[in-house]
Amino acid sequence: MVSEHAAQVLVASNRGPVSYTQGEDGSLTSKRGGGGLVSGLSAVDDKLWVCAALSDGDREAVRQGVAEEGVRMLDIDADLHADAYNGIANSVLWFVHHMLYQTPLEPAFDAEFRRQWAAYEAYNRAFAEALAEEAGEGAAVLVQDYHLALVPGMLRELRADLRIGHFSHTPWAPVDYFRLLPDDIGEQLLRGILGADRAAFLTRRWADAFIGCCTEILGGTGRTRIGVHGLGADADFLRRRSHEADVDERMAALREEVGPDRRTIVRVDRMELSKNIVRGLLAYRALLEEHPEWRERVAHIAFAYPSRQDLAVYQEYTAAVRTLAQEINAQYGTPDWTPVILHVKDDFARSLAAYRLADVALVNPIRDGMNLVAKEVPVVSDDGCVLVLSREAGAYEELGDASIVVNPYDVSATAEALHQALSMPHDERADRTKALAAAATALPPQQWFLDQLEALREG
Ligand code: G6P
């Protein structure tokens, strides 16, 4: 049954724009998230965001019926959600698209995988049913990411009248790697996305990889159109936010921590395997070893937002990052110089403070759909900043020319790139920062979203 208050624009994603925590007295506190979709969607009226309840607080909010207007949180059974999200989405699909498996050992698709796959299907079905219920006649539905790859196909069967789009925020695996998946599962994923009228990606490279998989495995992309929309940084928001009082306070504290007259190499990531934080630290250690003139004259600020800590491999990675940072500090540190300043905490204001201070930004992912940090730093930088950028980040297509580009596996070359970046004359650095900021803001989030909507409705 179609609901009375049927929406004309619907977005579906695992993580929604708001989350709740329940205090000891039972009261609920809400926290709004950021990101391209949140600002993108602010440009349209008559909309609904369908997302999953992710925490106990979210589930309680659903039970009490306090969810925000324009948001419908689905209270999916917690165990089922864990199998779909941790088991399939983050341990299998994320690994495939980011090519993170260490293939002599993993993956091994067994009965446990099949059980989790059934949960992934049920979780996708719950979204498809909710969307079918909420969407107005002929509405546009924009389904997000690898968590919901089966939704377009399922929704098409329930509601043939809808315009359905799918957007991938990740890379797409090349066909030889995608074929690690069991054949029937790979086909199901491709057919799920091809249930959309339009499937879109952050770069041409990921779109071509998807087309390659469809061509090799299914013989083509059928009637689905393929699009590319390279999300840019939200310049207005960033410039305003990065000059608020809390950011200034954190800058003062950070300057103190770095010490006087030192250069800074900054990185900000989720605590995420694909971000390549360990090799970044190895490169920094190699820099101190090969170019001792930088000792005591530079600090590496590495901030990470805790992420996916339900997965053992993420916990192990976090421990590896901490251990290596401590080793570097023990090996090179002096009474008034801490070579690596590592903080694992959710603090956006402090990240902006680091962006403003950065002399060098290190963005060296193994693979990344886009990487918005690479686009945000040049926009808010106080005094210009050199970007050391992995050629495997989606942002490379737009920012590669004005960056120092690295192969993310090549630790020695990354160390040399850091040396080159630190040594760059001030004028060249200023010119490059200008070029980076222009390229980074070419497609602001609202336009990015409206372009997708228009292209979907045109078809
Ligand atoms: C990537 C994905 C998003 C996801 C985000 C944070 O950017 O493309 O879909 O929301 O990571 O990960 P999390 O698992 O915490 O939602």
Image: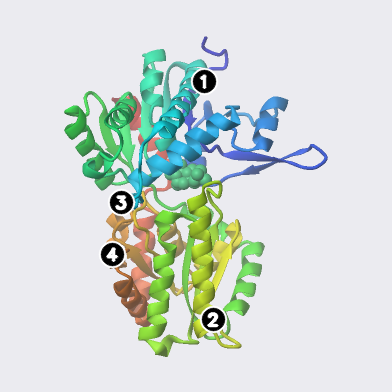
- Nearer the camera: disc 3 or disc 1: 3
| Colour scheme | rainbow
What x and y, as percent, mark residue 278? 43, 65
Q: Residue at x 70, y 31 (%)?
A: 60
- Does label 4 or label 3 sit earlier along the sequence? 3
| Within-10-Å neighbours for mark 4: few <14, some 14–19, many 20+ | some
Give the CA separation, mark 4 to mark 2.
28 Å
The number of discs equals 4
Which disc is residue 330 wearing? Answer: 2
Q: Give the residue at mark 4.
A: 407
Give the CA separation, mark 3 to mark 2.
34 Å
**As displayed, is residue 320 above or below residue 114?**
below
Q: Give the residue at mark 1.
A: 130
Callout 3–callout 1 Cβ contact below 8 Å = no
- Does label 3 or label 1 sit earlier along the sequence? 3
Q: Quadrant of residue 17?
A: top right
- Residue type of the residue flagged with mark 3: Pro
- Does label 3 or label 2 sit earlier along the sequence? 3
Judged left or right of residue 268, residue 410 is: left
Tell me if residue 43 can be seen: no
- Residue type of the residue flagged with mark 2: Ala
